[in-house]
Image (cartoon, helix red, strand yellow):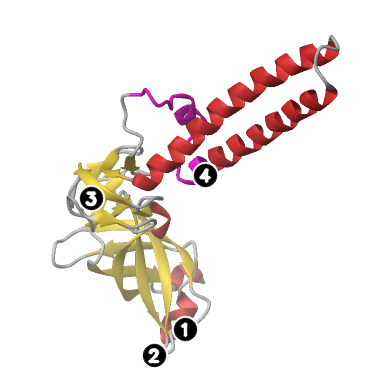
């Protein structure tokens, strides 16, 4: 009978790691020079918070092209409306009307192309509506913002440094939810499966928490002949730090 069986315990070594679904390597979508740095290593940040500000000639050119295209479209619309009225009244020729119509179509295409280029570097529709040559914000200003709330765990930028497009200058991680990767030896594979509850503990600090195995790797690592069992662990108080070595204790029958 199952009630007569003696529970056994399996001990597995493991390591705390960052949840890869809650980490972001952040860099600009344009090349520029770092003029302001607002955050340093270890700082907590909110989603949408500005980490650094770049001065980008490339961005200035993209914005200028968009503004010029927007003005050209406005003028093309006025010209077309005038030519259309004159043509209908038989004051102007059909050729003038068709030329104005073609110029309007070309101006629309030019504006759409300029708009798409700005969307590609992170500009939203509301950003475009506020854009003008007379705005207080310089056209070359590019803000590097965090796409998630978390902690800065890496920083690779200094004031005055030229930063390339897509170069990761900050890494932000949400450490309130971490992974524990447990090493499962071949002899224990039959005892470990997703859904099992486990106790994670660190004998050096005395930290201890309970969690649940949510995945076991389907293959073995070639060199060690071991599998990995993953535990997703809440870490609201931040006591578990990526890189810590821990142990898992699990009761099996």
To which residue does mark 1 refer?
Answer: 220
Q: Is residue 119 magenta?
A: yes
To which residue does mark 3 refer?
Answer: 238
To which residue does mark 2 refer?
Answer: 223
Magenta range: 117-135
Mark 1 Cα-neighbour bin, 10 Å: few <14, some 14–19, many ≥20: some
Which residue ends up furthest to the left in the rendered image?
A: 204
Q: Which mark is residue 37?
A: none
114 vs 175, nearest the viewer: 114
The Cα atoms of the two marked residues, 2 and 4, are separated by: 48 Å
Local SS, label 4? helix
To which residue does mark 4 refer?
Answer: 117
- Residue 9, quarter of the rendered image: bottom left
Local SS, label 1? loop
- Looking at the image, is mark 2 or mark 3 earlier in the sequence? 2
The Cα atoms of the two marked residues, 2 and 1, are separated by: 9 Å
């Amino acid at each position: 009978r199952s009630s007569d069986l003696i529970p056994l315990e399996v001990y597995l070594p493991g390591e705390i790691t960052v949840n890869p679904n809650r980490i972001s390597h952040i860099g600009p979508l344009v090349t520029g020079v770092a003029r302001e740095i607002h955050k340093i290593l270890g700082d907590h940040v909110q989603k949408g918070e500005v980490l650094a500000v770049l001065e980008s000639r490339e961005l200035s050119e993209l914005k200028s092209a968009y503004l010029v295209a927007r003005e050209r479209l406005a003028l093309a619309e006025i010209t077309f409306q005038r030519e259309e009225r004159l043509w209908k009244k038989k004051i102007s020729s059909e050729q003038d009307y068709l030329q104005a119509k073609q110029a309007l179509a070309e101006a629309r295409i030019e504006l759409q192309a300029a708009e798409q280029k700005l969307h590609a570097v992170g500009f939203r529709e509301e950003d475009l509506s506020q854009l003008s040559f007379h705005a207080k914000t310089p056209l070359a200003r590019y803000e590097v913002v965090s796409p998630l709330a978390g902690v800065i765990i890496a920083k690779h930028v200094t004031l005055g440094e030229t930063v390339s497009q897509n170069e990761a200058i900050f890494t932000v991680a949400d450490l309130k939810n971490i992974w524990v990767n447990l090493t499962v030896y071949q002899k224990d594979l039959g005892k470990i499966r997703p859904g099992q509850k486990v106790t994670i503990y660190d004998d050096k600090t005395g930290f201890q928490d309970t969690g649940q195995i949510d995945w076991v790797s389907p293959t073995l690592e070639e060199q060690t002949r071991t599998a990995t069992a993953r535990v997703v662990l809440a870490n609201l108080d931040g006591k578990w730090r990526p890189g810590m070595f821990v142990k898992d204790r699990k009761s099996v029958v």
